[in-house]
Image (cartoon, grey):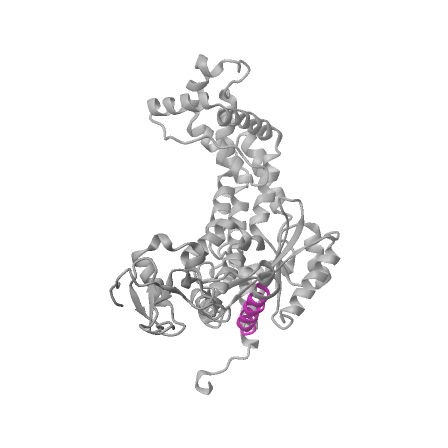
Amino acid sequence: MEGGESSAQIIKNAPSVLKADIWTHYGFYELKGKNELDKSHAVCKVCHTKIKYLGGNTTNWRNHLSRFHCEKLTPATKKTADPAQRRIDETLSTFPPNSEKAKKITQSVAAFIAKDLRPYSVVENAGFRHLLKTLEPRYKLPSRSHFTENVIPALYNGTKAQVMASMIQAKRVAITCDAWTSVATESYLTVTAHYISEDWQFLSHVLQTRAVYESHTGAHVAELLSRVVEEWQLSDKDVVLVTDNASNMIAAAEFGKFPHVKCFAHTLNLASQRALKVATLSRLLGRVRRISTFFHRSTTANHYLKEKQKCLGLKNHKLITDVATRWNSAYDMVERFLEQQPAICATLLSPEVRKGQSDLCTLNETDVSNAEDAVSALKPMKDATTLMSEESNPTVSLIAPINAQLFQDMTGTIGDSPMIHAIKNAIKTDLLKRYNSEAEKKILHTASALDPRFKGLPFLTVEERLEVYRGVTEEAASLEVISPCFM
């Protein structure tokens, strides 16, 4: 780059064959004594600086304008009008769709959609596109249809192949079948496989979630399960079916000839729900629920409750309102009420709180006594439910010992109050209907015998224990065991 010459020299416009927009700001001097242009240097029309002319390369000229005359750079000037140059710029500014970097980002977007259950339309959202542009400006996000027709199906097929390769090594597989309804009141059936891998890892995979438009009859569910078993090549895996206690699921196991185990958590819920329907307890729950709901809706009552908790040295806990589908929420509601009863009574005596709520009152002494009895009687069921929910991988070996303990806990004693007696009787009556077939008992007792925690089978009689051990020994003897020295 050379300094400007005398402004007396006239800068001639570039020939018309030079069409790039940059020539708006550059031209040439004439050769001295000749009627032709000196194309060895281009000359800036603003400051008369001479810049070597290297054919079609205009980078230095653009840099000069950007550095010294940025006000001259209009959007049109910033872009090159040369098609060849434009293609080069575009190539440098975006990743090719088939580049490793672009593929990796696209796969990550697909994983985001699949793992977080996002709708395909997320790739069209302005905020999401802005995020990707900020993180990697050179990445061009594919269209929604590209994800729906190519990327997600490829991800599914790849994942399915990996899962099948893993499951094919398993000798036995348990499948759980859950029927559920979405917020949009659409019915679905989800099938999940559980098995032990070659390296003794407990693995679970959702094999299918499909919309069910037909009636959920046992025969129809059995047909769907048979298709899943066939599709995932599980026919030789000694499949065991685990479902809730619904009659159609029990029928599905019979139609499909699957060995069947009923979900223990669901069994606990059914027995506990039956106890909640005991007339005295049901009325008590209604009264506690009304008080709890009032505090949830009244900011004034909540404020005074916190003040009373502080004065009485009680924990700053909110009251709980039960949910119909979870029996233990009713237990938690009553337990929390008893914990906060002094603060609740003191709050409800405040004129500011009772304003317009003259018919709202706390529990009387009989109600409180019944509430305490209810919590006491339901405590074993609460503990069992908590144990099952806290186990990351609850196994069938837990069912028999816990069930036996619950039978013992729900057996009436001479000192039981009418409330406790009614609750225990309701629960025990319901539990007696579960796990009483010989096939179910064999599965449960064998599993417990093989679990180091319960192998002594203390919940069985001596005769029952010996029978279980005999069956385990015979089955072990029938297995084909390859000696390590021949492996």
Image position, residue 212 (x, y; %): 70, 54
Residue at 58% of width from left, 44% of height from top?
A: 269
Residue 159 shown in magenta:
yes
Identify the image quadrant of residue 236. bottom right
Prevailing SS of the magenta stretch: helix
The quadrant in which the N terminus is found is bottom left
Residue 375, above or below 103: above
Residues shaded magenta? 152-169
In this view of the protein, which residue sits in the foreground, 387 or 86?
86
Residue at 51% of width from left, 48% of height from top?
A: 405
Residue at 53% of width from left, 27% of height from top?
A: 293
Q: How many marks?
A: 0
Viewed as shown, does residue 259 lie left or right of 167? right
Residue at 38% of width from left, 30% of height from top?
A: 316
Q: Is residue 342 visible?
A: no
Residue lying at the far left of the rendered structure:
3
Q: Is residue 66 visible?
A: yes
Residue 66 shown in magenta:
no
Image position, residue 114 (x, y; %): 54, 58
Image position, residue 374 (x, y; %): 52, 33
Viewed as shown, does residue 307 lie left or right of 430? left
Residue lying at the far bottom of the rendered structure:
486
Image position, residue 13 (x, y; %): 41, 64
Identify the image quadrant of residue 287. top right
In this view of the protein, which residue sits in the foreground, 278 or 85?
85
In this view of the protein, which residue sits in the foreground, 367 or 476?
367
